[in-house]
């Protein structure tokens, strides 16, 4: 079941996004299938979209609006391992959905850029980290960022699902993606302003699905 309430709230706050309502549902279903099957989400973007990629990871890998406590079984194991700090770990750790921003590996990215080709840094990571059942989310306001397109092509070759979060016409990223959200704006900053509430809604929908409190 899709948590439609989160989408309803999003549409009330941002009526301009009504044209992509079904696309948001499609994104959610792709991500849910990935996490249901033990997959991971790889995310990449440039500039503001790079910041968005890291922002999404922050909402998925820790509590967003819920506390996401660890299971009773893990809490018991932690306390058995360390009477000194097991209780603190059990009380403070939070459940996460496995997501990785590909911009955060500076030694690898700068080495590959220097030794091989800077445009292929994200593609190299998708090649190394990605597997069938994983999802690659490319964020590009134009849809034509070369490094994002290269990464999406590698993801397709590795039989991963590809999601494209973009604007304008969707560009090359929309062509490569299994599902795309193309927000109805043409200026970069306006596209970015609409990307944030969309991925916040998706993160809330996923949190509602996987965590009770």
Image (tube, rainbow, N blue to C red):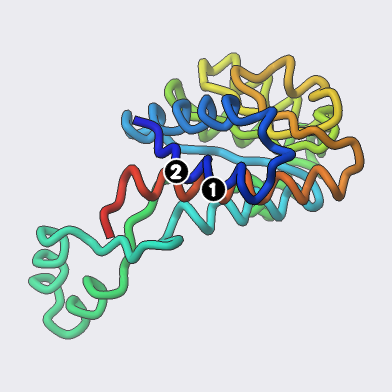
Q: Quadrant of residue 76?
A: bottom left
Quarter of the image that includes the C terminus: bottom left
User: What's the residue at 72%, 49% (across, down)?
Assistant: 50
Nearer-the-camera pick, 87 or 20? 20
- Calculate the distance from the C-alpha at mark 2 to the C-alpha at mark 1: 6 Å
SS class, disc 1? helix
Report whether 178 appears left or right of 135: right
Q: Which residue is mark 2?
A: 5
Query: Residue 209's x, y, as percent?
Result: 34, 43
Report whether 79 appears left or right of 165: left
How dense is the environment of label 1, judged by Cα within 10 Å: few (below 14), some, or many (20 and up)?
Answer: few
The reply to whether dot 2 and dot 1 touch (C-beta < 8 Å) is yes
User: What's the residue at 61%, 56% (across, down)?
Assistant: 55
Above or below, comparing residue 196 to residue 78 in the picture = above
Q: Residue furthest right?
A: 187
Task: Residue 201: give its label.
Answer: none
Query: Residue 38's x, y, as percent?
Result: 33, 34
Q: Which residue is mark 1?
A: 9
Above or below, comparing residue 115 to residue 67 in the picture = above
User: What's the residue at 60%, 17% (across, down)?
Assistant: 178
Above or below, comparing residue 44 to residue 144 in the picture = below
How dense is the environment of label 2, judged by Cα within 10 Å: few (below 14), some, or many (20 and up)?
Answer: few
User: What's the residue at 38%, 53% (across, down)?
Assistant: 96
Q: Quadrant of residue 40?
A: top left
SS class, disc 2? helix
């Amino acid at each position: 079941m899709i948590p439609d309430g989160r989408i309803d709230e999003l549409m009330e706050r941002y009526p301009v996004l009504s044209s992509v309502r079904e696309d948001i549902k499609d994104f959610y279903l792709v991500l849910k299938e990935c996490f249901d099957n033990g997959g991971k989400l790889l995310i990449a973007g440039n500039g503001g979209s790079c910041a968005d990629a890291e922002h999404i990871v922050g909402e998925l890998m820790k509590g967003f609006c819920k506390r996401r406590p660890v299971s009773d079984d893990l809490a018991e194991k932690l306390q058995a391992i360390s009477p000194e700090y097991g209780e603190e770990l059990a009380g403070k750790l939070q459940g996460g959905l496995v997501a990785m921003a590909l911009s955060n590996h500076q030694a690898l990215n700068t080495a590959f850029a220097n030794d091989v080709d800077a445009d292929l840094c994200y593609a190299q990571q998708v090649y190394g980290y990605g597997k069938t059942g994983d999802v690659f989310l490319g964020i590009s306001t134009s849809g034509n960022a070369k490094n994002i397109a290269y990464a999406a092509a590698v993801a397709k070759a590795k039989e991963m699902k590809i999601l494209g979060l973009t604007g304008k016409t969707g560009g090359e990223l929309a062509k490569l993606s299994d599902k795309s959200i193309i927000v109805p704006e043409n200026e970069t900053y306006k596209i970015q302003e609409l990307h944030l509430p969309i991925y916040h809604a998706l993160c809330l929908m996923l949190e509602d699905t996987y965590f009770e409190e």
